[in-house]
Amino acid sequence: MTQRSSRKIIHIDMDAFYASVEQRDDPSLRGQPVVVGGTPEGRGVVAAASYEARAFGIRSALPMRTALRLCPHVIRVATDFDRYREVSRGIHEIFHEHTDLVEPVSLDEAYLDVTWNKQEIPFGHRVARVIKRDIRQRLQLTASAGVAPSKFVAKIASDLEKPDGLVTIMPHQIRSFLDPLPVAKIPGVGKVTGERLQAIGIDTIAQLAAASVSDLERQFGRRGQYLHLRAQGIDNEPVAPISEPKQLSSETTFATDIFDEDQMRYAVQDLAQDVAGRLRRRSLRGRVVTLKARYPDFETVTRSLTGGLYLDSAPPVFDIALELLRRTDARRRGVRLLGVAVSGFADDDRAAQLDLFDMEQKG
């Protein structure tokens, strides 16, 4: 076994984080359907829902008015990001007692490489069990964990037995674990990509793994290779503590030049979904959307638009990127590459986060 294949990666995801903090701090909320987010009058959305609320079909990003309709007796609590950040700092203190290789994804989610850990615990699942125990004892919260040789598999595993779950996937179990799962379980495969995969007869990860790489690249550009590698369970991306970026972007190079406007639209929609998902995972919101297009003759152009609101959801990013695409010669000249980027992040993340619950959400 290679050193890389013997890595021990943990993906920790707190359970209904904001709602759980509220229930912990207010005993009257325990056992009750609770949603955290903006007011229905202000077109707010749900930032988090307790598991009692989820039983009524309430999920994050749902309009608050819809949540109240699904469960009229749900208890709405306003967000308190100062408190959530303080709790998150406590969680990360526990992480760093075991390893300095901690990659934050958001306030309530992180990857940890515990291959060589400070406590010299030999097994990744034991480290995860200790971390979960410490979070429960010190912070009175629960977390779910996935343990695997890669970030990709660990993330999928952490979601399978929520709340308070712990799923361990050994190297020899990766393919048998992934094969029966739907392709939607692959991080970054949203509704549009999922529908396009289904249209070519691919519903499960096993079917994706068996597909031709060249066929996938014709359909999805360079991203086709990414999808095929993930379906094989291959992910060598390291866990790396990272500073906040100035820009988040996603781009795809097509196997053949694209002239069809619908194909361009689908590609831009996928790219917008990918960027928006990464923004949310890192609790970032940006005002500047940039569209990058490379024509068949390799000339590359960019178009940017600065909006009045900070964005982190796919629909507005897609709408702006599509408008920017129309400002290029793509429809006339064709493209070999398209990219979407978001930048101009808020200096004050509290103001950016609060925007999420006050602005009108599309989709």
Image: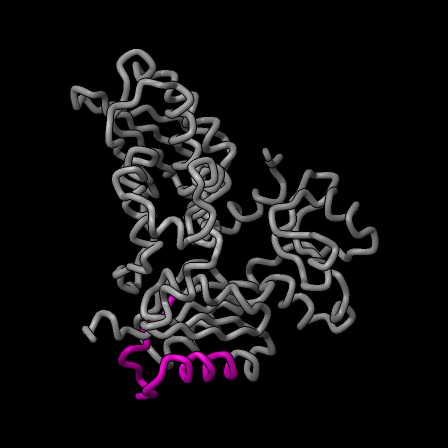
Residue closer to the observer: 228 or 101: 228
Q: Is residue 128 magenta?
A: yes
Tell me the quarter of the picture where residue 169 sits. Answer: bottom left
For the question of whether residue 311 can be seen, the reply is no
Q: Residue furthest right?
A: 73
Instruction: Using the image as rendered, state which of residue 200 and residue 358 is in the foreground.
Output: 200
Percent position of residue 273, x then y = 45, 40
Whether 255 is drawn above or below 261: the answer is below
Is residue 230 left or right of 214 when viewed as pictured? right
The residue positioned 50% from the left and 79% from the top of the image is 132
Q: Position of residue 116 (x, y in %)?
A: 27, 80
Q: Quadrant of residue 331?
A: top left
Which segment is the magenta one?
111-134
Q: Is residue 90 left or right of residue 216?
A: right
Question: Where is 8 relative to 19, above or below?
Answer: below
Q: Position of residue 130 (x, y in %)?
A: 46, 84
Vertical arrangement, residue 348 with respect to residue 362, above or below: below
Residue 272 in the image: state x and y as whole percent: 42, 36
Q: Quadrant where the N terminus lies?
A: bottom left
Residue 109 horizontal side relative to residue 227, left or right: right
Residue drawn at point x = 45 percent, y = 46 percent = 277
Q: Quadrant of residue 45?
A: top right
